[in-house]
Image: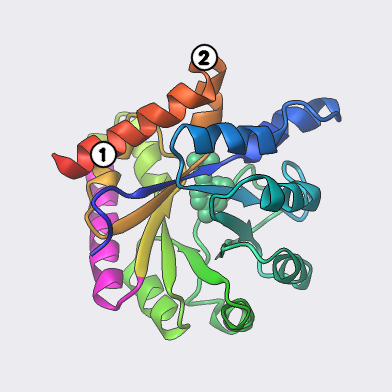
């Protein structure tokens, strides 16, 4: 059974989005990672995208030498990203789908359809001693194929649930939450470590953090946005407090 309170991985991509808007060095995502660590984050997550719209490989390299927390690299299944991951050797890699025209990772990786494409990436990363996670929709078929692929971890896409919470659609939110709960239980029963993330806010975190099989949440955009108003330290501390409250209730 996972630890009493899920780990919090803070995604620092959007600090780099703001930096890149002016092409300079400020605000520095590595400094944000250090601030998140001081506020109690358990890991740092980043997604180097094909178009480098936010963090870049230099950020990954600097992070590796500047923070002691585990680093989770989100990456598409491409030879370029695999080479980068093998060179940087983060603690974990989360395989995600990627389309240039999307604003963010809009759905999970369809491992049922893309099994043959994904399989060699799982093998190469596992062989290199990197913990591999598959970012999938909370669906029984995706869980079963993730297991067949030998993935030790899956991250359940919480975007549909969080969107329902934000729009006030309580029935929809409950349906999406049931799918997350069922996928988490099915995955854990197969021995897979369960993570979750995407779109999580202070309003939506509680019910996800309360799912006992979930060992880690990865949260980015909301925390960085909230940091504008309260500072990153306060935003991370409040998120962790809400996670702890939900799990121990
Ligand atoms: N987990 C994965 C696999 C993601 O791709 C993302 C977005 O980069 C997140 C978590 C974090 O999502 P958000 O920025 O909406 O909190």
Relative image position of residue 150 (x, y in whole percent): 45, 82
Q: Is residue 91 left or right of residue 25?
A: left
User: Do we see residue 179 in this rendering?
Assistant: yes
Q: Which residues are magenta?
A: 171-192
Q: What label does residue 112 carry, if any?
A: none
Q: Is residue 143 left or right of residue 245?
A: right
For label 1, the SS is: helix
Say which residue appears at 35% left-offset and 73% top-offset: 192
Quadrant assignment for the N terminus: bottom left
Question: In terms of depth relative to the viewer, which is nearer, 49 or 32?
Answer: 32
- 153 vs 35: above or below: below
User: Is residue 200 covered in magenta?
Assistant: no
- 139 vs 129: above or below: above
Q: What label does residue 229 carry, if any?
A: 2
Q: How many marks?
A: 2
Relative image position of residue 94 (x, y in whole percent): 55, 62
Question: In terms of depth relative to the viewer, which is nearer, 61 or 18?
Answer: 61
Dot 2, crowdedness within 10 Å: few (<14), some or many (≥20)?
Answer: few
Question: In terms of depth relative to the viewer, which is nearer, 172 or 12?
Answer: 12
Relative image position of residue 130 (x, y in whole percent): 57, 71
Task: Please identify the residue farthest to the left as the structure is shown.
Answer: 249
User: Is residue 180 covered in magenta?
Assistant: yes
**Residue 137 falls in image quadrant:** bottom left
Q: Would you name the residue on which mark 1 appears? A: 244
């Amino acid at each position: 059974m996972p630890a009493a309170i899920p780990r919090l991985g803070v995604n620092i991509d959007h600090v780099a989005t703001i930096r890149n808007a002016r092409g300079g060095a400020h605000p520095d995502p590595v400094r944000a990672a250090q601030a998140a660590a001081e506020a109690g984050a358990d890991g740092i997550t980043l997604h180097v995208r094909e178009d480098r719209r936010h963090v870049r490989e230099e950020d990954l390299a600097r992070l590796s030498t500047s923070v002691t927390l585990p680093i989770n690299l989100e990456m598409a299944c491409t030879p370029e990203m695999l080479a980068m991951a093998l060179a940087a050797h983060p603690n974990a890699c989360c395989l995600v789908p990627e389309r240039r025209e999307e604003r963010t990772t809009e759905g999970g990786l369809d491992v049922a359809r893309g099994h043959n494409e994904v399989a060699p990436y799982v093998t190469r990363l596992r062989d290199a001693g990197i913990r591999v996670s598959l970012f999938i929709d909370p669906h029984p078929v995706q869980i079963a194929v993730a297991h067949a692929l030998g993935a030790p971890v899956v991250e359940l896409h919480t975007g549909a649930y969080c969107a329902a919470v934000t729009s006030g659609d309580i029935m929809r939110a409950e349906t999406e939450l049931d799918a997350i709960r069922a996928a988490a239980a099915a995955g854990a029963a197969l021995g897979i470590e369960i993570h979750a993330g995407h779109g999580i806010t202070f309003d939506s975190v509680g019910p996800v953090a309360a799912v006992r099989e979930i060992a880690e949440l990865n949260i980015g955009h909301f925390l960085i946005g909230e940091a504008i108003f309260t500072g990153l330290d306060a935003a991370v501390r409040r998120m962790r407090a809400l996670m702890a409250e939900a799990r121990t209730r």
